Amino acid sequence: MKRILFSVVCVSLLLMGGCKDPEPTEEQQLNQYVNKWLYDNMDGLYYWNTTLPAYKSSLAKPSDYFKTLKYKDDRFSAIFESYQDILSQLNGVTPAEIGFEFQLWKENEINVLGVVTYVKHGTPAEKMGIRRGDIFRKINGQQITISNYSTLIDYLFDTSTSVSMNFATYFNGTYTDKTAVTVTKVTNYVEDPVYLDTVYTVNNKKVGYLVYNFFTNDPGDKTMKYDLELNSAIGQFKQQNISELIVDLRYNHGGMISSAIHLASMLVPNLASDKVFIYTEYNKNYTDYFNSSEFKSQYSDNPFVDNFATSITNTTTGAAMAPVQNVGNSLSRIFFLTGKGTASASEMVINGLKPFLTTVLIGDTTVGKNVGSTLVNDEKNTKNQWAFMPIILKYFNKDHQSDFTKGFAPNYLIKDDYSYALGDIHEGLLSKAISEISGLGVSPAKVAPVKRTMLQSSIEFKPVHSGLVIRNKSIDSYLKHKME
């Protein structure tokens, strides 16, 4: 009887304008706007846009709504709350940098330990003596465990100025924690992707070694600083008449396609501006626009092909800044050192060079990302600070090969052991490459036979990882065309 009475009352209130849904909050209204903006852009840009569900207005948080739009096999499209923060990270600028990259491993069924993979130049961490291979087990006094490691690792990336850490020694199967140390972070640290370049003389052979940790042109100032620095390093290899080259991409998770083109152009034999590096494939919207008379009347570029570059060109002025230094004619093969995080632009370089010379991979299987993104933000509504990176293309090498979604398997499977510094000829992956080059038989690091399971790397805790980002005149033109 009470239910019937309530229903009658509610119907009466509805007739009088009662029983209304509550008005959406200001945050929900913004979410609703952002979600419509996301859907409209995904409908236009997304490589798999034909798989989108029918549009429904939503008050959900944009990051949650975005998940409902992604194609089931899409591992890489991503969304971010701050456009400016993600733009800085793509340019290698970190708001609060701890000073090293690391990997997390299960110590046992309860505890987790971190292992430093490399230390960043000019940071307090480097100055206080933290080195590759150092082990840490406590953060801010708390033991790192399976249940809390995500929370504790956040302390290394938040905006705090420092963090307390306990490093440890390992002997006869036992870890012993050292006294806690305070590691000071660097505000707005600018990381140089060219980490190390050197030349070894082995059995009268000159062997170039390059450690390149991510792909970006410059720190966001349009100077092309990093690509020019990379060019200079390859130029030094050329001056020293190298006949073998080892490119270390084991920690390189990708970045800008333009930098990938430049690196590949420095390495390909018989460099020429009409030689195809990659072909790109887009959805029907892009394809129709790029084939339209409107586009062709304004641009001479072919958006479906990227050739090798003979010069490094200023992206804003279009003026050539420096001729590309090329060592390709001195090489019959290239050794790439790879890891579980080697992805995107790194894989593009490997795939793009395969038709032109032998590529020998040493290390671990790569990620398997044969698709690319662009960074999209809302230029019309300043209240919308969200940005997202939808997959917009698939790429192929000049032989139209792109079947590596499971990653490139190495020719020589060598586990990263951290026992020696990067560049030390006894370091496991490097020593294998040198042995293959010279037959010298350099002994790799001897690692204690401890079986561990890797959980995550520091890269995976960051907003952008395994990125392949394209932004050029053609993409900018389409974005402008779509929003008009």
Image: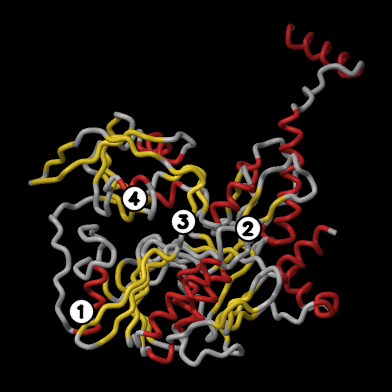
Q: Earlier in the sequence, mark 2 or mark 1?
A: 2
Label 2 – label 1 distance at C-alpha: 42 Å
Disc 2 marks which residue?
390
Label 4 – label 3 distance at C-alpha: 16 Å
Q: Nearer the viewer, mark 4 or mark 3?
A: 3
Q: Which mark is residue 88?
A: none
Label 2 – label 4 distance at C-alpha: 28 Å
What is the quadrant of the N terminus in the image? top right
Tags 2 and 3 in contact by the CB under 8 Å rule?
A: no
Q: Secondary structure at mark 4?
A: strand
Q: Nearer the viewer, mark 3 or mark 1?
A: 3
Q: Secondary structure at mark 1?
A: helix
The residue positioned 63% from the left and 63% from the top of the image is 222
Q: Secondary structure at mark 3?
A: loop
Q: Label 3 is placed on what type of residue? A: Glu
**In the image, residue 380 above or below residue 321:** above
Of 170 and 284, the residue lying toward us: 170
Disc 4 marks which residue?
102
Of 60 and 98, the residue lying toward us: 98
The residue positioned 80% from the left and 61% from the top of the image is 482
Residue that sits furthest to the left in the current view: 172
Q: Position of residue 329 (x, y in %)?
A: 42, 92
Q: Label 4 is placed on what type of residue? A: Phe
Q: Label 2 is placed on what type of residue? A: Pro
Q: Position of residue 138 (x, y in %)?
A: 28, 35
Identify the colour scheme used.
Answer: secondary structure
Disc 1 marks which residue?
435
Q: Which mark is residue 191?
A: 3
